[in-house]
Image (tube, helix red, strand yellow):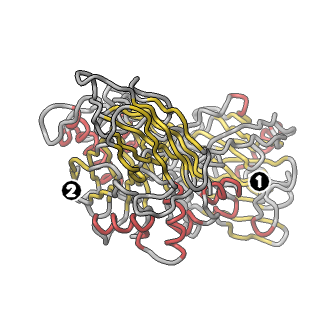
């Protein structure tokens, strides 16, 4: 509908904005899932069937807020992309005065934002000023095409040096500026309340959990020096995973990546980094041994590796690094999605290129570049292949015939889930990176996205991070997810300080906590030669950190039965002092063991 025609609707519109709608203080998460929008948040409706040539037909507009952000959601009926290929416009009259700002759709708009053009203008008594998305804290979801969208704006934003929301209420309208539909204007009054975000700590819930990090390090960033190296060092140290799924390591080999990680995260005695690089830029790096590898679609940056997390879990683990084609390459991304599902179907059935043991956990992560059609995301999660003639029948990714589970990966201190952000770009922050897994064979635990720009000072300090680390390190954020794997633990029982086997008993740990030295005392009972061990077997001692990683051996003792004391002075196998924390000293004889929990202070 041309702007000149809006005045004809004004009398009808004004009736709907005469008084503010009921305010909704809600914990809305901008993730493109929409399940946290209740019917009570609907502030305006519009009849169906009044769409224009674009096919966009608004029916509902919802608005809510918390202490930091304004949220609004609208539907389009027609599937469109939120950041291009349409002429959607939203406008805000922040002083509710039709005589100020820009006359637009029946309001005097201080802010006019064109979603498809990714540009906006601020209008005040001083004229018109261009506005960038970061100046108003604009976040939009979904990043892929959809029939509805949700947006967040910063309540403290000051475009052109003036408050975007100077008052307790405002008017908002959404327009299809392609001779199309309009919903609103609607008046909204901010609801009181903060809706505080519960911070996500970085620590594992359980030391046995397998931690996977998916991270696009942007154009060989892992090998940069200076401030970027410092930022990456803090991020990698804070995440401290068992498996990395790296993207954009273009110019360095697997061996060079192993060496570089040793610089950032040095190995303790008995452990090492193991890396594989089969395609142009993905590198999988694992603390676990790598048993086998596959390049899923040559030339398309999809690499799979089978790793062995034993003795922590008695099962293999298939991890897949993804870096799908960028930007407008929807056809390429669909081929990559189809190829991945075909590979998983092959892995779960006998014959072909890969045969997994039944119920082997599968984790796929990386930069999927999901910025275009929703169809590619649907293929990834559901197994619905588009080109069945080339890639065979559809197949749900999980072992039980269900969809891939998608890790939420919320920011630690904000209800946001974007993983890519570059304020110098016109494109909005978006969710390009994902971690998916087979929920029938793995259980998700702690998870988050390391976006330091939305973290609180307290959370930054606790993780050893600085506010701009994410921005300096890469245009992508690191995604972190912890899993327990079906098959159960078969190694060190880090949470059990008592006798696991019925044959060895922890008697004492003193002093505990300690600063210089501590002694753990175990009792090994005598067992006849026909029993599980003989009286002459060697009794071994070893120290592990809270993640189950080997730190150092302590002196072995050759007398089997009786009292055994193991002393540890807080150093690793090279004699270097280790950082303070929780450690476990294990006493083992003939495959039987018990563990002592020790707290090292400095």
Considering every residue shown, the one lying at the far left of the view is 351
Instruction: Tell me if I can see residue 409 in this picture.
Output: no
Q: Residue at x 68, y 41 (%)?
A: 198
Instruction: Name the secondary structure under disc 2.
Output: loop
Between residue 190 and residue 104, name the one nearer to us.
Answer: 190
Where is residue 197 shown, x and y percent of the image? Answer: 70, 43
Q: Can you give x and y, in whole percent of width and height, for residue 378 in the image?
A: 39, 38
Count of marks overlaid on the render: 2
Mark 2 and mark 1: Cα distance apart in space: 47 Å
Q: Quadrant of the C terminus?
A: bottom right
- Identify the residue under disc 2: 298
**397 sits to left or right of 9:** left
Question: Residue at label 1?
Answer: 155
Residue drawn where x is 23% and y is 59% of the image: 278
Any part of residue 138 in sight? yes
User: Is the residue 576 above or below the residue 529 in the image?
Assistant: below
Q: Residues within 10 Å of mark 1 (few under 14, many from 20)?
A: many
**Which of the numbered marks, if any, corresponds to residue 558?**
none
Q: Going 65% across and 63% down the picture, which residue do you hit? A: 134
* Residue at position x 47%, y 44% in the image: 481
List x then y, in percent, for residue 453: 63, 60
Q: Are marks 2 and 1 in contact (CB under 8 Å)?
A: no
Q: Is residue 264 above or below residue 198?
A: below
Kind of element beneath mark 1: loop
- The quarter holding residue 532 reads top left
């Amino acid at each position: 509908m041309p702007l000149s025609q809006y005045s004809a609707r004004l009398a009808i519109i004004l009736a709907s904005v005469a008084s503010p709608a009921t305010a909704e203080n809600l914990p809305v998460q901008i993730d493109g899932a929409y399940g946290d929008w209740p019917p009570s948040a609907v502030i305006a409706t519009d009849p169906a069937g009044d769409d224009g040539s674009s096919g966009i037909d608004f029916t509902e507009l919802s608005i809510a807020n918390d202490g930091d952000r304004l949220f609004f959601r609208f539907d389009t009926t027609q599937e469109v992309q939120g950041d291009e290929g349409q002429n959607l416009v939203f406008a805000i009259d922040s002083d509710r005065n039709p005589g100020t700002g820009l006359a637009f759709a029946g309001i005097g708009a201080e802010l006019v934002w064109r979603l498809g053009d990714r540009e906006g203008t601020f209008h005040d008594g001083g004229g018109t000023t261009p506005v960038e998305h970061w100046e108003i804290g604009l976040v939009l979801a979904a990043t892929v095409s959809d029939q509805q969208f949700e947006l967040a704006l910063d309540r403290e934003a000051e475009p052109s040096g003036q408050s975007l929301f100077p008052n307790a209420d405002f008017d908002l309208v959404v327009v299809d500026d392609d001779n199309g539909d309009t919903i609103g204007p609607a008046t909204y009054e901010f609801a009181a309340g903060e809706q505080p975000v519960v911070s996500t700590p970085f620590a594992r819930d359980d030391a046995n959990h397998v931690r996977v990090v998916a991270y696009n390090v942007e154009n060989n960033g892992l090998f940069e020096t200076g401030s970027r190296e410092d930022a990456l060092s803090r991020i990698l140290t804070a995440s401290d995973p068992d498996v990395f799924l790296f993207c954009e390591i273009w110019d360095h080999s697997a061996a060079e990546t192993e060496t570089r990680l040793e610089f950032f995260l040095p190995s303790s005695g008995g452990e090492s980094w193991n890396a594989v690089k089969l395609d142009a830029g993905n590198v999988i790096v694992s603390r676990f041994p790598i048993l086998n590898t596959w390049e899923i679609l040559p030339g398309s940056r999809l690499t799979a590796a089978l790793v062995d997390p034993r003795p922590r879990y008695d099962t293999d683990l298939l991890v897949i690094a993804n870096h799908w084609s960028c930007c407008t390459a929807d056809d390429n991304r669909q081929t990559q999605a189809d190829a991945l599902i075909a590979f998983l179907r092959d892995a779960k059935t006998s014959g072909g290129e890969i045969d997994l043991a039944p119920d082997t956990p599968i984790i796929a992560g990386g930069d999927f570049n999901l910025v275009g059609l929703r169809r590619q995301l649907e293929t990834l999660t559901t197994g619905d292949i588009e080109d069945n003639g080339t890639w065979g029948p559809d197949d749900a990714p999980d072992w039980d015939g269900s969809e891939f589970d998608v890790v939420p990966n919320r920011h630690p201190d904000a209800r946001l889930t974007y993983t890519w952000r570059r304020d110098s770009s016109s494109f909005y922050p978006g969710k390009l990176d994902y971690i998916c897994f087979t929920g029938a064979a793995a259980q998700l635990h702690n998870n988050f996205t390391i976006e330091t720009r939305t973290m609180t000072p307290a959370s930054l300090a606790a993780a050893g991070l600085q506010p701009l680390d994410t921005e300096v390190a890469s245009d992508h954020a690191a995604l972190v997810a912890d899993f327990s794997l079906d098959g159960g633990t078969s190694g060190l029982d880090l949470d059990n300080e008592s006798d696991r086997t019925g044959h060895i008993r922890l008697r004492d740990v003193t002093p505990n906590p300690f600063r210089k030295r501590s002694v753990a005392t175990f009792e090994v009972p005598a067992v006849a030669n026909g029993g599980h061990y003989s009286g002459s077997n060697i009794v071994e001692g070893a120290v592990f950190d809270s993640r189950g990683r080997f730190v150092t051996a302590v002196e072995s003792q050759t007398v089997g039965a009786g009292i055994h004391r193991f002393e540890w002075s807080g150093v690793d196998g090279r004699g270097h002092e280790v950082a303070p924390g929780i450690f476990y000293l294990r006493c083992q004889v003939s495959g039987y063991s018990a563990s002592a929990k020790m707290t090292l202070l400095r």
